[in-house]
Image: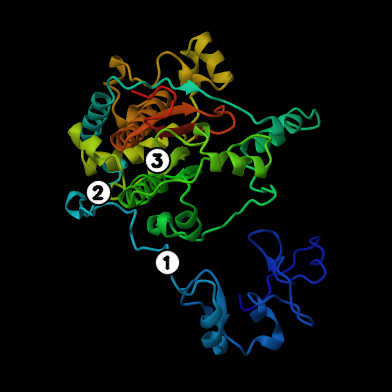
Amino acid sequence: MAASGPTPHGTGFPAEGRCGYYVEKKKRFCRMVVAAGKRFCGEHAGAAEEENARKRILCPLDPKHTVYEDQLAKHLKKCNSREKPKPDFFIQDINAGLKDETEIPEQLVPISFLSEEQMGNLIKKLRKASEGLNSTLKDQIMSHPALHDALNDPKNGDSATKHLKQQVDGKHRKKNSVFERLQIDIQHLCLNKIPLLSKEKLPVVGIGKHLCGVATDLALRCLVETYAASCEERNEEPLAKRVKNDKTEKEINTLAKEGNEKNIPEKWTPVAGIVIALCCHHRCDWRHYVGKEYFRALGLGAVEFHYFQRMSSWATCGMQKTSLEASNISTKRKDKQNDGSEEHDDGGYRITDDSTESLPGFLTVEEKKKIGHLCKLLIDQGRINYLQQKGFNPALQYYTDPLVSLENVLLTALPNHSSSPETTA
């Protein structure tokens, strides 16, 4: 970083007002804005001859960026990575769950280090624990009318259409709507300490788009245990349920004052619903997992969970079939793969008896994929069981085509007194 990278022939010049340092790895100039009269940005300032006398060091708070050594004290006071005052709704590890470190071995060998016998035993345990589970989930692929024109625009290619399907509109411009962004790890978030929620006493709907691995468990505990339990302990009564129709605010207030029965739930619960797009089961953590009791009831523990969550990546790792395997697939199976619906066939993810002799190093791509899906399903079933125990009616379903996203399973849950889709057994 002491000197500017060489500028290869034909690369041209940096954009006006941008850093003149050539980033060899990216084959382009740095795009950071430079100060008036300077050639390089702060990160690459050491490359300029006039600034060679000054030394840049790694920031002790975050080694991902550097700072002038003689300005370190000043930088530490304003660095974005500095520790900031904790808000009232920050409570250390409130959603982490009970710590039981005795169950977690200090060192677990990687899957690739397991013997064929050990791996075979793990797969047998997985298949036994998954007996009776419904691996063929229901399709619930829906689209909002607001997206109809954009999705059907003939100018869009496949990539643009896929991108539109993956987008979530975060720009809410409804008049009088209140939005608040909380920058906090879900592990430490206490919802009932948020002023808006504690003041209005409104039911909460938890929505998560691809809450990666352990974040799903932290979010469930945040909603179901931390928030719901605290509200029930205080016996808080809700305000009238808001009516979502074309009536004016005045009419709504009138209905609320009159105590119209249609506006008030028969039995109010702090959490009115949960919708979470699941993903990255390989990033789950036994310490925070909400389905521990479910696993224990099946005779499984921290060790099995560790390997199952690692094996779950086989479902979405993008492994390709060999030509030999492809030649043994029926025409019907090929058609299902071509339309992206192989995960919906009648066979589900069950491993056939004749595949049990195929040990880890010799598992076919298809067998690994099925095992990966079984691992995901079993982990999610623990979450289903947890929500059922907490008084919810949960379900798993596909919310988009696997061609759009391989992580296409949605977890939904409604309070038991509400009507809801059939739960996954």
**x and y, in percent, of residue 44 in the image:** 65, 75
**Disc 3 and disc 2: Cα gap in Å?**
42 Å
Judge from the rendering whether residue 291 lies leftward or rightward of residue 418; answer left or right.
left
- Residue designated by label 2: 108
- Where residue 269 is drawn, which disc sits there? 3
Residue in the picture at 49% in, 33% down: 261
Q: Which quadrant holds the N terminus?
A: bottom right
Specify the color scheme. rainbow
Q: Could you say which quadrant of the image residue 299 lies in?
A: top left
- Where residue 88 is drawn, which disc sits there? 1
Residue in the picture at 74% in, 72% down: 20
The amino acid beneath tag 3 is: Thr
The amino acid beneath tag 1 is: Asp
**x and y, in percent, of residue 204 in the image:** 47, 45
Q: Could you say which quadrant of the image residue 370 lies in?
A: top left
In the rendered view, tell whether residue 424 sits above or below residue 288. Answer: above
Residue in the picture at 72% in, 29% down: 148
Question: Element type at marker 1?
Answer: loop
Q: Nearer the viewer, mark 3 or mark 2?
A: 3
For residue 242, say whether it is visible.
no
Q: Camera-side residue: 146 or 373?
A: 146
**Disc 1 and disc 3: Cα gap in Å?**
24 Å
**Disc 1 and disc 2: Cα gap in Å?**
38 Å
Q: Report crowding for label 3: few under 14, some 14 to 19, many 20 or more residues within 10 A (C-alpha).
A: many
